[in-house]
Image (cartoon, grey):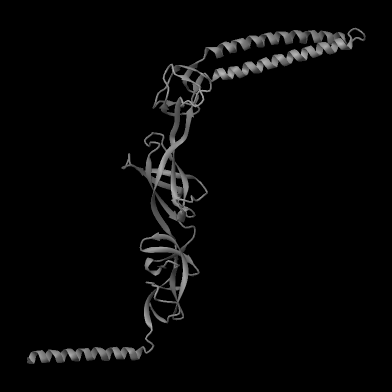
Amino acid sequence: MHMRSSLFIILLSFLAACHERQAAVAKNDPSGVDTVKVFLLQADSVKKGISLPGELSPLDNVQIRAKVQGYIRKMNVDIGSRVRKGQVLAVIDAPEINTRVQELNERVQAAKAKFQSSKDYFERINKAAQADGVIAPSEWQRTKNQMLGDSSEYHAALLSAASLKQTGDYLTIIAPFSGVISKRNIVVGSFVGNTGDTPLFELEDNSVLRLRVAVPEAYTSALLAGNTGELTTRSLPDRKFKATLKRKSGIIDNETRTEVWEFEVPNAGGELKAGGYADVKMLFLRSKPSFIVPASAMVTTLEKRFVIKVENGSTRWVDVRAGFNMGEKSELFGELKAGDTLVLKGNEELKTGIKVVSRF
């Protein structure tokens, strides 16, 4: 019992001492001003690395169709064949076109002979007309008109023959560029050339691949370090490939709030496959230093986003716009300058105009 009384007395003494100490502190700071942790705002270079999905596609892709009707007589390639520009892929058999070409060639020869005859006759008449009274003016004009008419018929025949010859050239299907045959939809004997037919072949140039990446709006005005990205694919997870930025779409998609950036990836060895997906690592930079603050300093509400600035011992809310989110730190923009004193851990309860004591 005596022991308990002694402990109780000691506890009372301790509490009294604490109360006296607190009273002394209150006397030293009679205003009761809150103390807040602060830091000085500084500008720094901003870097942000992100990984985005992308899709690979051929540099060029074309569906090859027949321009004339006929039957496939010969086929020189199949799916997976590598071809050169100008190489013959298939040959169409259309005998009526060949017959028509021969017929027009004969007409050209006949028109040429007729024109040559009327031309020679006009030249003789024209020479004789140099002497007065030998050739009547009407005869001279008639022979000239005959020559001009035969000349027109001859040139018309040449054009018709050239046009049909060009059509005949369409019987040979050639590759418009070097690449790989990715699809084949015909066999020898297939009838081709009807409107709405499926393409004979699909040809892709995969020596260089296009890589399309949808970049979020927040990054579209930033600089891409080295103007390049690093990509990996599911088919080659142990390999890394370099992609060079070549072009931007120039618009923000209303639904995704992204801008399409197109890269080019060298693929001379054909290791990468068009149509595949890739993960692209990119490092974004700002063109000039900007403000970086601890994430705790930025307060976000339904109405606004702000930081709390301390001026002359009082608080003031300053509206800001968020930039890159870097985890524990954030980039921001607003009516601020380097050297401003900001509250380290902002909150809505620390209203504008509250007197505080800053502690770094």
Vertical position of residue 347 compared to residue 236: above or below? below
Give the quadrant of residue 263: top left
Q: Residue at x 64, y 9 (%)?
A: 106
Q: Nearer the viewer, residue 103 or 69?
A: 69
Vertical position of residue 260 compared to residue 106: above or below? below
In the image as oriented, which residue stretches furthest toward the right?
A: 133
Vertical position of residue 332 compared to residue 92: above or below? below
The quadrant the N terminus occupies is bottom left
Give the quadrant of residue 9: bottom left
In the image as oriented, which residue stretches furthest toward the left?
A: 1
Q: Position of residue 303 (x, y in %)?
A: 45, 67
Q: Nearer the viewer, residue 195 or 43?
A: 195
Q: Position of residue 154 (x, y in %)?
A: 70, 14
Left or right? Give the position of 5 relative to 319.
Answer: left
Q: Residue at x 45, y 54 (%)?
A: 219
Q: Position of residue 136 (x, y in %)?
A: 89, 9
Give the quadrant of residue 234: top left
